[in-house]
Image (cartoon, rainbow, N blue to C red):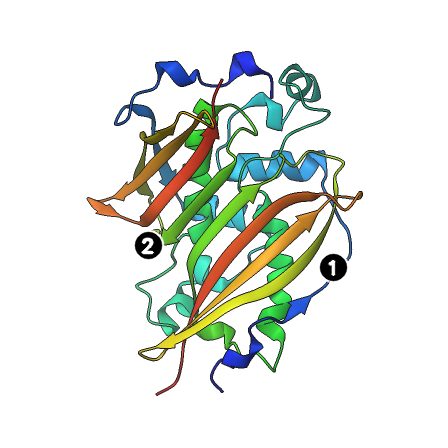
């Protein structure tokens, strides 16, 4: 990654929102992610299977939510410039058929490391007023 | 059968080589809405300083989950996959993954904790390239509901 395309450390302020995006999950999105990732757990495409394990219906892959959140950070950080990304999965996202489950991804500067010149980016994924990820944090090297 | 806490420390692999392809990077980038052309166009990736298409930051899950499968199917660990929920995930990249990489993965069971009818199983996948140099470390925790 060339330096001119990554965020400038000195321009960052703790608390500042660096990226925000609305993401709509549909059954189509889930099938596409299943194929791309190789995660074919039927609770992500089959309502009967999902209900049989106590879910309200088909839910999005946690890793799809995490992947979509990472994409929002990576678009700001520069491709390949997210050094570390972690999250807990706290709430499932039921995906209706037909229709869409729409989430809002917000990425903020959580902390700055002067010595390493890295930013900790805290990510919130909001679904109907509820946070579906916990402690979602990315480490982004800066110029 | 409940999860066996004595399975901590087990390791599996190294796995067979996973070849990272341009096609898979493009497909995964579309699936997670990663919009940079560096995931799709070789010239754009080179302009960013990479030798080939660069993978989105959670791409390593494809490789890690294949390796984690060894843990889930090991009868001596005792995970009932119908009772599993994904609890957490972490990617630490030692360098970005690019098309052409040949990745070998070793998986370790780092931690098993049990409380209130739930077993938490934490695995660590160490992804290395053809030279044996570290590429990505993937930590993943599964929550397994135990029968009462």
On the image, the x and y values in percent for residue B92 come to 54, 43
Is residue A37 visible in this depiction of the protein? no
On the image, the x and y values in percent for residue A18 come to 34, 23
Q: Nearer the viewer, residue A13 or B77?
A: A13
* Residue at 63%, 35% in the rendered image: B95
Q: Chain of mark 1?
A: B
Which dot, 1 or 2, sits closer to the camera? 1
Q: Is residue A85 above or below residue A140?
A: below
Q: CA distance from mark 1 to mark 2?
A: 34 Å
Image check: A34 left or right of A86? right
Q: Nearer the viewer, residue A56 or A105?
A: A105
Q: Nearer the viewer, residue A125 or B123?
A: B123
Residue extending furthest top? A4
* Residue at 38%, 72% in the rendered image: A53
* Residue at 64%, 30% in the rendered image: B54
The kind of secondary structure element at disc 2 is: loop
Q: Is residue B68 above or below residue B51?
A: below
* Callout 1–callout 2 Cβ contact below 8 Å: no
Residue extending furthest left? A129
Q: Disc number at residue A31?
A: none
Residue placed under numbered mark 1 in the picture: B15
Image check: B85 left or right of B39? left
Residue extending furthest right? B131
Q: Chain of mark 2?
A: A
On the image, the x and y values in percent for residue B83 come to 43, 74
Residue placed under numbered mark 2 in the picture: A94
Is residue A125 visible in this depiction of the protein? yes
The kind of secondary structure element at disc 1 is: loop
Crowd rating for badge 1 (residues with CA inside 10 Å; few <14, some 14–19, many 20+): some
Q: Is residue B123 above or below residue B58?
A: below
On the image, the x and y values in percent for residue A140 come to 46, 30
């Amino acid at each position: 990654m060339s330096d001119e395309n990554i965020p400038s450390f000195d321009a960052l302020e703790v608390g500042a929102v660096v990226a925000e995006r609305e993401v709509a999950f549909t059954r189509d999105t889930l099938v596409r992610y299943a194929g791309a990732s190789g995660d074919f757990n039927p609770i992500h495409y089959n309502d009967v299977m999902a209900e049989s394990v106590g879910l309200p219906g088909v839910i999005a892959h946690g890793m799809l939510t995490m992947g979509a959140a990472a994409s929002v950070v990576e678009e700001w950080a520069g491709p390949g410039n997210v050094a570390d990304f972690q999250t807990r999965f706290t709430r499932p996202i039921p995906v209706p058929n037909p229709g869409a489950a729409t989430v809002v991804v917000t990425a903020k500067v959580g902390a700055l490391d002067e010595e390493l010149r890295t930013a900790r980016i805290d990510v919130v994924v909001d679904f109907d007023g509820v946070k579906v990820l916990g402690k979602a944090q990315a480490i982004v090297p800066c110029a | 059968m409940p999860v066996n806490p004595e399975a901590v420390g087990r390791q599996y692999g190294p796995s067979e080589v996973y070849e990272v392809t341009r096609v898979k990077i493009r497909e995964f980038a579309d699936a997670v809405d990663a919009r940079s052309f560096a995931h799709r166009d070789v010239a754009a990736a080179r302009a960013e300083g990479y030798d080939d298409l660069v993978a989105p930051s959670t791409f390593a899950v494809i490789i890690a989950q294949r390796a984690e499968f060894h843990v889930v199917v090991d009868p001596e660990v005792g995970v009932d996959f119908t009772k599993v929920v994904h609890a957490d995930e972490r990617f630490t990249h030692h360098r970005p993954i690019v098309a052409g990489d040949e990745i070998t993965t070793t998986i370790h069971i780092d931690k098993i904790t049990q409380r209130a009818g739930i077993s938490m199983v934490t695995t660590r996948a160490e992804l290395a390239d053809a030279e044996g140099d570290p590429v990505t470390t993937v930590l993943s925790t599964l929550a397994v509901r135990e029968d009462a």
